[in-house]
């Protein structure tokens, strides 16, 4: 296995992932507004329309994580991309809210399968000595998508129409298929699975569960940002500034990513995880108190450093702690919990928003991240500290 990080295959799998997540973020940022304007539904139901995609991702990851070694990593990637392409074509035929929910759910399954495949493949491509750095750079494909996708989605909603978003998604999914075709997946000798029937061990990597539970709560907190930042901006009359929120969010990650991954590899995960969770908390508090564009964008900086660095760090932790032949399951376990948080979060939070408002919502989410930080200490951080001291 090559010790180089920046290989053609690393670039191809990262690019494939970029297109997949571009589609995801473009649609999730515009779907709540699309649902309200087209079908005149409640805030909670519009949140479900945005989040049910991620619930579908959960099922896609369940299948992908369990079956990827049997089906084959690249074949699994093809299945996810082609299924997603078919679902994107279905967006052009939507005529009711129930039809929208079904298509969003099925599209989420396809995305979950494809993104599990890319995460598994890249975990194998990245050399062990560059685990934190490589995972961080791979995560930039998601970060860039999370910036450009919502920006395009919101801009197109305001200046063109919703159908134009679906057309862009169709072009992007075709591009991801081309990149996947150019990708060469490394051959790895894997032990034969001898388990038959239903076993939780076949669907989850138990070594990844502690960090995955932390990701669940962090994901719920982030879902409040990705799903409701546009509605919040309309309430406080900062819509124009808010369209740049995810651009600033990503710029913060781009600036910090070159050294956060290296610090992870050289200093250990606790050296990175605790500060970024604190940054996330600060960002949510600032967001809750935003009365002008400057504070709103400063909150994007802290949220970018916080959440944007936490997920790749968590992925590096679970991959490092899991057997090589179960990297796919470890990755899918992590993202299933994160997806459940970001998917169920918009629906759950949408119920409380009419009672507490957006400002108090983000304060509550800051408390949730405080809880997640304490939980991380007990399930992983404390153990890691003791291991470092004993060396």
Image: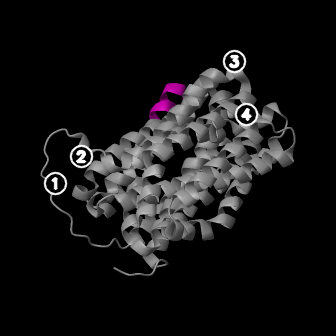
Bounds of the magenta segment: 94-103
- What residue is pinned by disc 3? 355
Q: Nearer the viewer, residue 304 or 142?
A: 304
Question: Mark 1 falls on what kind of element?
Answer: loop
Q: CA distance from mark 1 to mark 3?
A: 50 Å
Q: Nearer the viewer, residue 117 or 373?
A: 373
Percent x, y of residue 72: 26, 61
Q: Which mark is residue 231?
A: 4
* Quadrant holding the C terminus: bottom left
Question: Mark 2 falls on what kind of element?
Answer: helix
- What residue is pinned by disc 2? 202
Among the two numbered marks 4 and 3 on one chain, the one whose residue lies closer to the N terminus = 4
Among the two numbered marks 4 and 1 on one chain, the one whose residue lies closer to the N terminus = 1
Which label sits in the foreground, 4 or 3? 3
Q: CA distance from mark 4 to mark 2?
A: 40 Å
* Residue 202, placed above or below residue 237: below
Percent x, y of residue 293: 85, 46
Q: CA distance from mark 4 to mark 1?
A: 48 Å
> 10 Å neighbourhood of mark 2: few (<14), some, or many (≥20)?
some
Which label sits in the foreground, 4 or 2? 2
- What residue is pinned by disc 1? 193
Which corner quadrant of the image does residue 87 belong to?
A: top left
Q: Is residue 325 visible?
A: yes
Q: Residue furthest top?
A: 355
Question: Mark 4 falls on what kind of element?
Answer: helix
Q: CA distance from mark 2 to mark 3?
A: 42 Å
Q: CA distance from mark 2 to mark 1?
A: 9 Å
Taking the magenta stretch, the answer to whether it contains residue 122 is no
């Amino acid at each position: 296995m090559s010790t180089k990080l920046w290989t053609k295959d690393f670039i191809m799998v990262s690019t494939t992932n970029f297109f997949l997540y571009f589609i995801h973020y473009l649609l999730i940022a515009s779907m709540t507004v699309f649902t309200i304007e087209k079908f005149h539904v409640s805030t909670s139901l519009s949140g479900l329309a945005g989040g049910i995609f991620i619930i579908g991702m959960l099922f896609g990851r369940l299948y992908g994580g369990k079956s990827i070694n049997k089906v084959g990593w690249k074949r699994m990637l093809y299945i996810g991309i082609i299924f997603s392409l078919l679902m994107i074509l279905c967006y052009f035929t939507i005529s009711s809210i129930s039809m929208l929910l079904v298509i969003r759910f099925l599209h989420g399954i396809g995305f979950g399968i494809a993104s599990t495949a890319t995460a598994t493949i890249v975990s194998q491509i990245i050399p062990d000595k560059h685990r934190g750095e490589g995972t961080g750079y791979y995560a930039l494909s998601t970060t860039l998508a999370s910036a450009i996708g919502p920006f395009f989605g919101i801009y197109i909603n305001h200046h063109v129409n919703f159908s134009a978003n679906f057309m862009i998604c169709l072009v992007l999914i075709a591009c991801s298929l081309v990149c996947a075709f150019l990708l060469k997946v490394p051959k790895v000798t894997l032990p034969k699975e001898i388990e038959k029937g239903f076993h939780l061990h076949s669907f989850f990597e138990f070594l990844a569960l502690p960090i995955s539970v932390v990701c669940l709560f962090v994901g719920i907190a982030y879902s409040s940002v990705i799903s409701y930042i546009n509605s919040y901006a309309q309430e406080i009359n900062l819509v124009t500034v808010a369209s740049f929120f995810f651009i600033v969010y990503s710029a913060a990650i781009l600036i910090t990513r070159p050294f956060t991954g290296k610090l992870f590899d050289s200093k250990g995960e606790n050296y990175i995880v605790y500060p970024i969770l604190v940054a996330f908390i600060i960002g949510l508090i600032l967001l809750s108190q935003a009365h002008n564009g400057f504070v709103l964008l400063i909150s994007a900086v802290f949220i970018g450093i916080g959440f944007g660095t936490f997920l790749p760090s968590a992925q590096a932790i679970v991959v490092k702690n899991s057997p090589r032949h179960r990297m796919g399951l470890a990755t899918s376990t992590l993202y299933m919990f994160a997806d459940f948080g970001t998917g169920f979060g918009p629906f759950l939070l949408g119920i409380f928003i009419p009672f507490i408002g957006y400002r108090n919502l983000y304060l509550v989410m800051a408390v949730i991240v405080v809880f997640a930080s304490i939980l991380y200490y007990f399930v992983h951080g404390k153990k890691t500290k003791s291991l470092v001291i004993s060396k």
